[in-house]
Image (cartoon, helix red, strand yellow):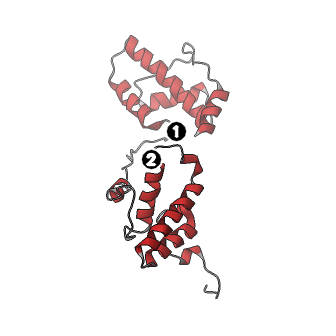
Amino acid sequence: MNIEGLDYNTQRERLVLPEYGREVQNMVDYALTLTDKEDRQQCAETIIATMARMSTQNRESEDFYQKLWDHLALMSNFKLDIDYPYDVTQVDKIYAKGDPVVYPMNNIPVRHYGHMLFEVFEKLKTMEPGVERDELVRATANQMKRNLVQWGHGSSDDEKVAFDLERFTDGNIVLDLDRFKFDRIEVKELDKKRKKR
């Protein structure tokens, strides 16, 4: 849709640093058109003063003005010919975006238990019976129950945990629910942790 007099952001050039807004970018673009170096310098200092008023929360940091001049250099694509009070030659390297972090896509049957519990299930399959395995079974079963409660996936009853533990360890671990006692789970604490995310 093209209506005369209306100028939509989607039709405009993308902002280099959107936190300063379109008007500051327009000021930088105007400074680039000035032919006199003194006028450009004065305009740049005015732009820095405007940017400083917009960023009052960071004013206490030692390198506050260094960052503002760096941002000015970035917004002008290093084409603003002025006398910078700071070295801005390395700015593009400092603010360059790094490579995206590769997220491991592990194939696990049920996500609410998480990848780490499935690693524990694999370990439990090969462990010899004894005190160490019993302690790991206790910790694993309690964590499974906490996960079920926390993520709200249907029933969090003891039978579900026992069934899943037996299933994911290929029948090597069978909980005797008449003898096994789960730790007390504070649902309010789990709710607080969930809300913090």
Q: Position of residue 170 (x, y in %)?
A: 40, 30
For the point 62% across and 23% down, the residue is: 185
Q: Nearer the viewer, mark 1 or mark 2?
A: 2
Q: Considering depth in this image, is 109 or 187 the residue closer to the camera?
A: 187
Count neighbours of disc 2 (C-alpha within 10 A) and say few if under 14, some if 14 to 19, many if 20 or more: few
Q: Position of residue 138 (x, y in %)?
A: 48, 18
Count neighbours of disc 1 (C-alpha within 10 A) and say few if under 14, some if 14 to 19, many if 20 or more: some
For the point 45% across and 59% down, the residue is: 71
In this rendering, position of residue 23 left or right of residue 135: right
For the point 38% across and 55% down, the residue is: 86
- Provide the residue designation for mark 1: 112
Q: Considering depth in this image, is 12 or 138 the residue closer to the camera?
A: 12
Q: Position of residue 135 (x, y in %)?
A: 44, 15
For the point 62% across and 19% down, the residue is: 184
Which residue ends up furthest to the front in the rendered image?
Answer: 38
Secondary-structure class at tag 1: loop
Q: Quadrant of residue 125?
A: top left
Which residue ends up furthest to the bottom in the rendered image?
Answer: 4
Q: Position of residue 141 (x, y in %)?
A: 50, 24
Indicate whether 160 appears above or below 74: above
Indicate whether 5 appears above or below 81: below
- Of labels 1 and 2, earlier in sequence is 2
Secondary-structure class at tag 2: loop
Question: Could you give the CA–CA distance between mark 1 and mark 2, rounded to whole angstroms?
Answer: 44 Å
The amino acid beneath tag 2 is: Asp
- Provide the residue designation for mark 2: 63
In this rendering, position of residue 55 left or right of residue 119: right
Q: Identify the image quadrant of the C terminus.
A: top right
The amino acid beneath tag 1 is: His
